[in-house]
């Protein structure tokens, strides 16, 4: 095809930009893909010879990096140069919820998007297609267009001759299965006005995605569809978690309820697992964006409806820490709890909005000594999330297992000896290795009365039967 894309630049080497560009480079060996970031450390890790050091963990990602890096996939900090060389620029920078000013706590902070658009306006040459990839509030494309247009019309000494098209191409990948999702998308959404630009982006995807999965919409529908998809998914989780609480109260079993309703083809069986509450960088942020938009456009009932999904999630996380405290005789001081899993789901090292953060904070507040294990999350990351240094750093000489009145935590790399003297074990992330724990052996190591709280429902109750462990699992009305 005439004027095909030969050179792509992606601004932002994070959880979205990194894997997405890796798959594009893998499926389009004829295209040069440059991923740029302002964070030098992150780029160094992407370029690290040891593939275990890549800044994000995704199954299958290391193999692609090994295949394509420095062939047609490059990671650098040379933002200016790579923007100027690109025919197509993806913007995949972070868009967290604003913490202050108008819309604080709800609207997305677009300062990184704006900075990226300004960089594109400054350095792009010729005609460039700008693709918004990050999750964004509706009408962000307008902001990008405005910034690019103002540069085009600028009366500066060196007026730009560059021209732009802006497309919305939201990412639907799910962390932990990002590579699979990118290689086998349910759909690829391209929102835009200019057919030639849309066609050029579609041409890239056609290298591995079938035609019927390429959906074309107007730019605002594309932006809103992304927010809506995440809001619907998050709503399912709050719905099933609310029913889980009711199951616990009534003697029903949420797994049986999920199975029963999941057989209804109109409802479907996916995303009906009760858990400790949804986490991840997108769900809460996207719903809060919807809430903000609804309020802004004078639709308070719509805003309240979606806000309740977020409120239920926060209530649910607090509910879990409260019921643990209640079962351990109403106080956690002098009690050791082993926490299994800190990531917001398995197969990722991401902890953003993880339910573990609030639940662990609550337990520490109640005076518990937490021993936290996660196969992929570092001790430093946990310290950042809990806003508290681990016990071993604060008290170099002391022994963590020495019980304390004051809540504290530490992390462990191995589960060997972890359960010695523990009062309780709490499962927060569904890592495969936790399914293999021998509870009969573990039971002998724990202080009695011992508890196992399974907030992910990954333990077969039969494995705990005939041990001295009291077993609680999410949404289970029947106590063993
Ligand atoms: C989500 C969307 O799925 C994805 O399409 C979008 O691009 C980004 O946001 P992600 O945040 O990576 O992806 O994870 P997801 O698998 O959706 O899980 C989100 C949270 O819900 C996790 O904390 C997960 O543990 C929880 N969850 C999911 C449940 O508690 N129960 C379920 O049945 C499914
Ligand atoms: P996501 O999950 O949306 O990918 P991340 O926080 O993992 O979000 O990644 C976003 C990346 O974008 C970060 O590595 C950050 O340093 C980078 N970034 C933010 N602003 C800019 C910018 N103006 N230019 C280049 N990179 C940027």
Image (spheres, grey):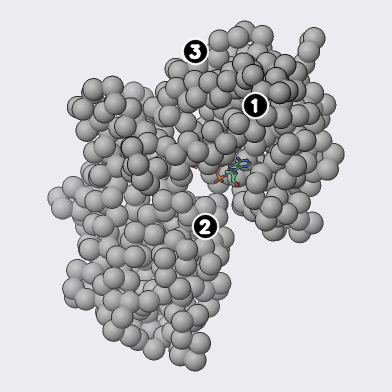
Tell me the residue at 66%/9% (across/down): 196
Q: Quadrant of residue 447?
A: bottom left
Return the disc, 1 or 2, that comes first in the chain's sequence.
1
Residue 342 image offset from top left, x and y in percent: 45, 60
**Residue position marked by numbered label 1 in the rendering:** 121
Of the residues tagged 3 and 1, which is closer to the observer? 1
Name the one closer to the observer, 259 or 57: 57
Residue 101 image offset from top left, x and y in percent: 35, 41
Q: Residue furthest bottom?
A: 397
Q: Indicate which quadrant contains ligand 2.
A: top right
Say which element carries label 1.
Answer: helix
Determine whether 177 is above or below 166 in the image. Answer: below
Tell me the residue at 46%/51% (across/down): 352
**Residue position marked by numbered label 2 in the rendering:** 432
Tell me the residue at 24%/51% (across/down): 315
Disc 1 CB within 8 Å of nearest ligand 2 atom: no
Return the disc, 3 or 1, that comes first in the chain's sequence.
1
Determine whether 52 is above or below 76 in the image. Answer: below
């Amino acid at each position: 095809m005439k004027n095909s894309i030969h050179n792509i630049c992606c601004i932002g080497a994070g959880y979205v930009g990194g894997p997405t560009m890796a798959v594009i480079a893998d499926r389009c060996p004829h295209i040069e893909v440059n991923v740029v970031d302002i964070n030098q450390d992150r780029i160094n890790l992407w370029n690290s010879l040891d593939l275990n050091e890549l800044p994000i963990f995704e199954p299958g990602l290391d193999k692609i990096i090994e295949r394509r890096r420095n062939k047609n996939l490059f990671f650098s900090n040379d933002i200016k140069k790579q923007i100027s060389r690109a025919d197509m620029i993806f913007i995949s920078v972070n868009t967290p919820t604003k913490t202050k000013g108008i819309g604080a706590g709800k609207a997305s902070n677009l300062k990184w998007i704006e900075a990226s658009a300004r960089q594109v306006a400054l350095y792009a040459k010729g005609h460039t297609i700008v693709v918004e990839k990050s999750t964004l509030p509706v009408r962000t494309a307008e902001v990008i267009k405005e910034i690019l247009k103002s540069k085009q019309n600028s009366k500066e000494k060196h007026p730009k001759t560059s021209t732009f098209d802006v497309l919305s191409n939201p990412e639907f990948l799910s962390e932990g299965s990002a590579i699979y999702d990118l290689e086998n998308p349910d759909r690829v959404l391209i929102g835009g006005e200019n057919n030639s630009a849309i066609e050029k982006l579609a041409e890239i995807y056609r290298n591995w995605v079938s035609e019927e999965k390429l959906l074309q919409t107007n730019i605002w529908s594309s932006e809103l569809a992304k927010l809506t998809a995440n809001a619907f998914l998050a709503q399912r989780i709050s719905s099933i978690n609310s029913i889980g609480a009711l199951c616990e109260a009534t003697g029903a079993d949420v797994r049986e309820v999920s199975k029963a309703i999941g057989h209804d083809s109109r409802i479907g069986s996916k995303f009906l697992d009760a858990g400790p509450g949804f986490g991840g960088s997108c769900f809460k942020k996207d719903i809060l964006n919807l809430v903000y938009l609804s309020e802004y456009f004078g639709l308070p009932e719509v805003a309240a409806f979606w806000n309740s999904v977020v409120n239920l999630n926060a209530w649910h996380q607090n509910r879990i820490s409260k019921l643990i405290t209640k079962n351990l005789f109403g106080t956690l001081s002098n009690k050791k709890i082993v926490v299994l899993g800190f990531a917001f789901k398995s197969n990722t090292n991401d902890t953003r909005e993880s339910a573990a953060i609030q639940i662990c904070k609550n337990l520490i507040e109640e005076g518990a000594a937490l021993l936290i294990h996660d196969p992929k999350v570092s001790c430093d990351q946990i310290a950042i999330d809990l806003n508290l240094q681990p016990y071993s750093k604060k008290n170099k000489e002391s022994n963590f297992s020495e019980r304390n009145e004051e809540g504290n935590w530490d992390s462990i790399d191995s589960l060997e000896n972890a359960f010695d003297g523990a009062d309780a074990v709490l499962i927060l992330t569904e890592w495969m290795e936790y399914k293999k724990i021998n509870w009969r052996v573990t039971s002998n190591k724990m202080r009695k009365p011992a508890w196992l709280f399974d907030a992910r429902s990954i333990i077969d109750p039969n494995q705990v039967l005939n041990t001295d462990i009291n077993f609680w699992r999410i949404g289970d009305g029947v106590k063993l």
